[in-house]
Amino acid sequence: MAPVQPFSTQFTLSREYLAECFDQSLPHGKGAKPNYLFPILLFAAGAGLLLFIEQSKVAGYMLIALAVLELLHIRFRRAWWLTRQMWGKGAGAEVKLTIDEDGIQTQNAYAQTALMWSDIERVIETDLGLILVAKSGSRQYLSKSLFPADLVNEIIAKANGQAGTRS
């Protein structure tokens, strides 16, 4: 396997970058399709309690309120996720990204991560970026706008080469 050219860059964890992360990662994640079954069951259970229980109706109203809250969570999940990220310490911070023969490292004032090539199970290429899926199941999104075009192909080839050597 050919070595990966060393590369280093910096970028800001801006709202735009985080929105791209969410939008590009969502179709490839576990929650790609919203689960409406849970709020429907909560609503049905709450309505059942209201209709068939003569005593206090508080539990029924609570279940219906939880169903409504869950529907709001589904409807506004992108906005809520972005808000939570922007409230975090890392929001607006400069991130140093380094790619070398060992793997991919990111570092900012609050966190440092390293994903070794041998730890990458696969790479999912999206229109605007790469989703690196680790053996542990964790995922890391990197925007293609951070790299020269030839480096994107090298990252994919290196990660797939590592995945191929395990088989």
Image: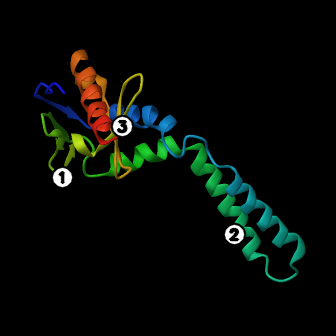
Q: Quick one: 138 or 79, which is closer to the camera?
A: 138
How crowded pointer 2 is (Cα within 10 Å; few <14, some 14-19, many 20+) is rated as some
The residue that appears at 65% across and 51% down in the rendered structure is 71
Q: Which quadrant holds residue 20? A: top left
Q: Which residue is mark 1?
A: 110
Number of on-image labels: 3
The residue that appears at 88% across and 81% down in the rendered structure is 54
For the residues labelled 1 and 2, the Cα–Cα distance comes to 39 Å
Q: Which residue is mark 3?
A: 122
How crowded pointer 1 is (Cα within 10 Å; few <14, some 14-19, many 20+) is rated as few
Q: Which residue is mark 2?
A: 62
Q: Mark 1 touching mark 2, by CB under 8 A? A: no
Q: Along the polypeptide, which appears first: circle 1 or circle 2? A: 2
Find residue 76 and report its horizontal and vertical position in percent: 55, 44
What scheme was used to colour the molecule? rainbow
Quadrant holding the N terminus: top left
- Secondary structure category for the residue under label 3: strand
Q: Nearer the viewer, mark 1 or mark 2?
A: 1
The residue that appears at 37% across and 23% down in the rendered structure is 128
Q: Along the polypeptide, which appears first: circle 3 or circle 1? A: 1
In the displayed orientation, state which residue is furthest to the top: 149
- Secondary structure category for the residue under label 2: helix
